[in-house]
Image (cartoon, rainbow, N blue to C red):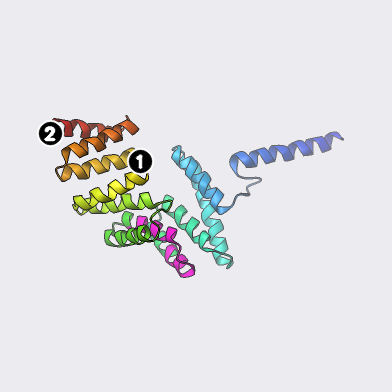
Amino acid sequence: MKLCTMFFVLYLVTQSVFAQTTGSVLGVQPYSALQNYQIGRELEEKSRMNEAIPYYNEAVGRCMDEISNDTASSESYVILTWTLARQGRYSEVIQWGERGLRVNTDYRLIETMGEAYFYLKDYERALNFMQRYVNAVPQGSTTATAYFFIGEIYHLKQHFFHADIAYTTAVRLNPNNSSWWYRLGLSREATGERVQAIKAYEQAVKLNPRNQQARDALERAGRG
């Protein structure tokens, strides 16, 4: 093999490795919208949001291309709204979610729109969308999250018994979230259920000993 050919092969191999680790070859993203979204989520969970943003932007761009080229499926709208939500672009989540629902009643869109309405402080619409989701998909991948948001809304409305029920359902479906157990403890404490509140705080601290809010609440409730 000639030396120049060997260098060219080495260059291609190097570019391939670079693509796998950074997601680009000569500035071109080879990943699908979903893959870009997933990479962005992984980076965000590692507190590397600055690195996640390009992947989120690429996911949005690919979904937009599918929509503008009339090649979009409901999946395109789902990934688009997921990504926009991660970027805090909640009004756009509502806009594209509504368009996606005209394509197909995908309940993942309904849950994501519920979260968007929550962060836009439109709690009545948020509650409506979350209830629609849990009624239609009682065992969905984000049903626990939907119940958590229902609990948050009832807690904000000071309907603490309703909040207790929603939070309890959330931790039953996903028992490993320390923050959710803490919020459940708050709702129980607000209804005077101190013993049950302590149990919730204890579980929150067990799951995450660095959850200072739960530790403080446990100490406070224990003194009551």
Residue 83 in sight from this viewpoint: yes
Percent x, y for residue 60? 51, 55
Picture residue at 33% right of the left edge, 44% below the top: 171
Q: Going 54% across and 52% down the picture, which residue do you hit?
A: 34
Residue farthest left in this picture = 224
Who comes first in sequence, dot 1 or dot 2?
1
Q: How many residues crowd around disc 1 within 10 Å: few (fewer than 14), some, or many (20 or more)?
A: some
User: Which residue, given by chain and number where applicable, does mark 2 sit on?
Assistant: 224
Furthest residue toward right: 1
The residue drawn where x is 22% and y is 53% is: 162
Circle 2 — which element? loop
- The type of residue carrying mark 1 is Pro
Q: Is residue 87 visible?
A: no
Q: Tell me how many marks there are.
A: 2
| Above/below status of 143 relative to 95 | above
Q: Secondary structure at mark 1?
A: loop
Q: Which mark is residue 175?
A: 1
| Residue 163 highlighted magenta (yes or no) | no
The stretch in magenta equals 97-117
On the rendered structure, is 65 left or right of 115?
Answer: right
Gap between marks 1 and 2 measured at Cα: 26 Å
Quadrant into which the N terminus falls:
top right
| Mark 1 or mark 2, whichever is nearer to me | 1
Give amino acid for label 2: Gly
In this rendering, the answer to whether 9 lies above or below 28 is above
Vertical placement of residue 84 versus 74, above or below = above
Nearer-the-camera pick, 128 or 119 = 128
Residue 140 % position (x, y): 42, 53
- Magenta segment's dominant SS is helix
